[in-house]
Image (cartoon, rainbow, N blue to C red):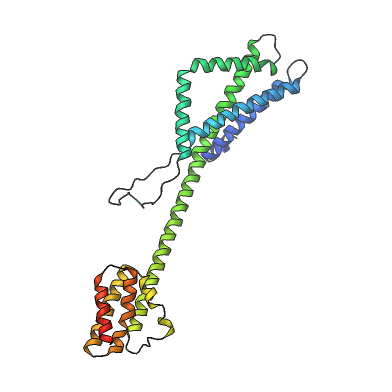
Amino acid sequence: MLSRYNGLAPDVRWRITFSLAFILGVCTLLLLGLLSEGPGKVQRTMAALLLAGASGAVGAFLGFLFGIPRSQQVTIAPNGDSGGAPRSYSENTNLEQISDWLTKIIVGLTLVQFSELLDMLKVLSAAYGPAIVNHSNAAVPQATAMAIVIYFLMAALFFVYLWTRIYVEALFRRQSVMLDNELEDLINQREEDANSQDAEALQLTDEFLDEKADPHSEKYKDIEKKIAESSFIARTLIFERAREARRKAWRQDRPEDAAKAIPIFRGLIAAAPGKYHRNYGQLGYAIVASS
């Protein structure tokens, strides 16, 4: 039996250990109540279980409070270097801050008011002990109640502390990785959409500037809008191509081809109104060359 227990994974062994500790404690309370002398055995058993449950609840709260993992906050430097993938948001750490504050308060009060807390435990045990154990010596019920409080409080504290440290931290890490992956997918999707939009604007410009293209075709109806929605790099390439087409049409005295550059320069101006005066200049040249 011991060899099979040692062969289990560590995370399974500690769960089995604490489960047996709780089962053993509950069984002890049942025997204590059922084997007690005098009437009211059921009431004594329920009182013992109630005290154990309350103590365990306090211990579980403290264990969760002490075991809440603390997230690592990444500070983005002014040059954008964060040591990893920079985020445009910060994680909500309210629960961690509350845990930190309460932990310091509880530890501080325990160290400073330890004697007062011990007196409160003695008063609680003295008041609650007779409801659990019927004994002529008053020290026996008090010691029994105190032992129940300490046993279940510490067992629940360590159990929940380990559970929080192992499973809650893993849950937070998994959630953070999933969120990072979702953000990365979203960024990649936006980049793909932008690249597709730029490619469409460039292809549409090349087709529109072709000498054989019909400028009145339905496919060129939104050419100004598509150029305006493209990226700065794509608009730079579009500007160079439109300017070269306008110059070629002017040198060859083809006003109909020079007129094709007009909607292209209008789209470039719509993308950045009031900026890049070369767009306005080329638009004026194209209007003059087309007349």
Kindly give the residue lying farthest to the left in the view shown: 251
Residue closer to the observer: 179 or 154: 179
Q: Is residue 19 above or below residue 79?
A: above
User: Is residue 245 in sight in this rendering?
Assistant: no
Q: Is residue 7 left or right of residue 225?
A: right
Q: Residue 224, percent across and down?
A: 37, 76
Kindly give the residue lying farthest to the top in the view shown: 137
Q: Is residue 10 left or right of residue 195?
A: right
Residue at image coords 70%, 12%: 135
Q: Quadrant of residue 59?
A: top right
Residue closer to the observer: 37 or 230: 230
Q: Residue 7, percent across and down?
A: 54, 39
User: Is residue 31 in sight in this rendering?
Assistant: yes
Residue at image coords 53%, 37%: 163
Q: Is residue 207 above or below residue 78?
A: below
Residue closer to the observer: 259 or 55: 259
Residue at image coords 34%, 76%: 202
> In the rendered view of the protein, which quadrant contains the N terminus?
top right
Kindly give the residue lying farthest to the right in the view shown: 39
Residue at image coords 53%, 39%: 11
Count all numbered tags in the image, as a single digit: 0
Q: Residue 153, percent across and down?
A: 57, 26
Residue closer to the observer: 243 or 163: 243
Q: Residue 46, percent across and down?
A: 71, 25
> In the rendered view of the protein, which quadrant contains the C terminus?
bottom left
Q: Is residue 41 above or below residue 193?
A: above
Q: Is residue 248 above or below residue 65?
A: below
